[in-house]
Structures are given as C-alpha cells and as structure tokens.
Image: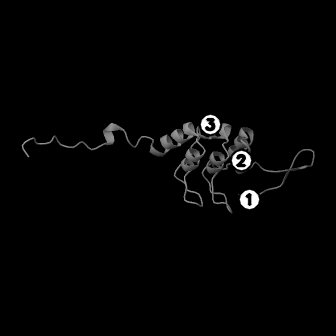
Amino acid sequence: MVALRVKSDSGEAKRPPDIYQAAIDDDVAELARALEDGQKLDELRKGYVTTAVHLACAHRSMSFLEVAMGHDFNPWVRDQNDRLAMDHAIAQRLTAIAEGLYSKMYEGKWQIENVAQLPDSDPQI
C-alpha cells in the first residue's frame, strides 16, 4: 500500500484510510473508507506478512469482523507463521467468527450431490 498525502479543503494533510489499523482498532468506519479506497481484506501487509482479517482476529475486533464477513475475501491466505485467520479466531475463542471463516473456506464444496456414491456392498463377499 502506498501512503499518499492528500490535503483537505482546509489545507491540512489528510491520511488515506488504513485497513490494517481499522482491524486493530475495531473501526468499521475506517474499514468502509479503506474498502472504498480499493484496499483488500486478504492482502498481505508488507513487513508483517499478515492480512487485516488475521489482525482483527488476533485483536478480537468483533465489529470489524462482523462487517468483513459480509465481504468477499480469500480465507485461505496464511500469515508469516503459516496460520490462517481461522487459526487466530480459534485461539481467541471467537467461535462464531471461526465458524463463519470455515463456511467461507468450504462454501459449496461439501454438498451431498458433490460426494461420490459408493456401490452397495455385496453381502456374499
């Protein structure tokens, strides 16, 4: 992410939205501005090699996570310690968030019509 300096109407320097800081601070307004700015929930943060969702789970930022779960992102991204955001949610005992991440990970993959049916066993064998 490139930090741009933008001036407000009053001439003051205005900092661009920061999705990672929003995750740490549990700031949904900053999250909304960051998403409007084109920032991604699953983009790895340089230097920390983690995503905003990983940070939000680690910091127990429930409001951020509840909003983030309604957006499209890749829940399979791993951080610098090879952990998924779901691993952080489980470690922080964020059960509902862990379940939501699990659903995003396996969405539509385990429907019964996708499972191969085994032939009936032959009782004479």
Q: Quadrant of residue 65?
A: top right
Q: Above or below — where is 47 with respect to 77?
A: below
Residue under label 1, please give it.
2
Residue at 59%, 37% in the rendered image: 70
Q: Are marks 1 and 2 in contact (CB under 8 Å)?
A: no
Q: CA distance from mark 3 to mark 1?
A: 27 Å
Circle 1 — which element? loop
Q: Is residue 121 left or right of residue 46?
A: left
Residue under label 3, please give it.
66
Provide residue 38's location: percent of width, then percent of height.
Answer: 67, 49
Specify the farthest residue to the left. Answer: 124
Q: CA distance from mark 1 to mark 2?
A: 19 Å
Q: How many marks?
A: 3
Mark 3 residue crowding within 10 angstroms, few (<14) / some (14–19) / many (20+) = some
Specify the farthest residue to the right. Answer: 10
Q: CA distance from mark 2 to mark 3?
A: 14 Å
Q: Earlier in the sequence, mark 1 or mark 2?
A: 1
Q: Nearer the viewer, residue 1 or 9?
A: 1
**Which numbered circle lies on residue 24?**
2
Mark 3 vs mark 1, foreground winner is: 3
Residue at 58%, 47% in the rendered image: 91
Residue at 55%, 49% in the rendered image: 87
Provide residue 20's location: percent of width, then percent of height.
Answer: 70, 50
Q: Quadrant of residue 67?
A: top right
Look at label 3 and name its amino acid: Glu
Q: Nearer the viewer, residue 60 or 76?
A: 60
Q: Earlier in the sequence, mark 2 or mark 3?
A: 2
Mark 2 residue crowding within 10 angstroms, few (<14) / some (14–19) / many (20+) = some
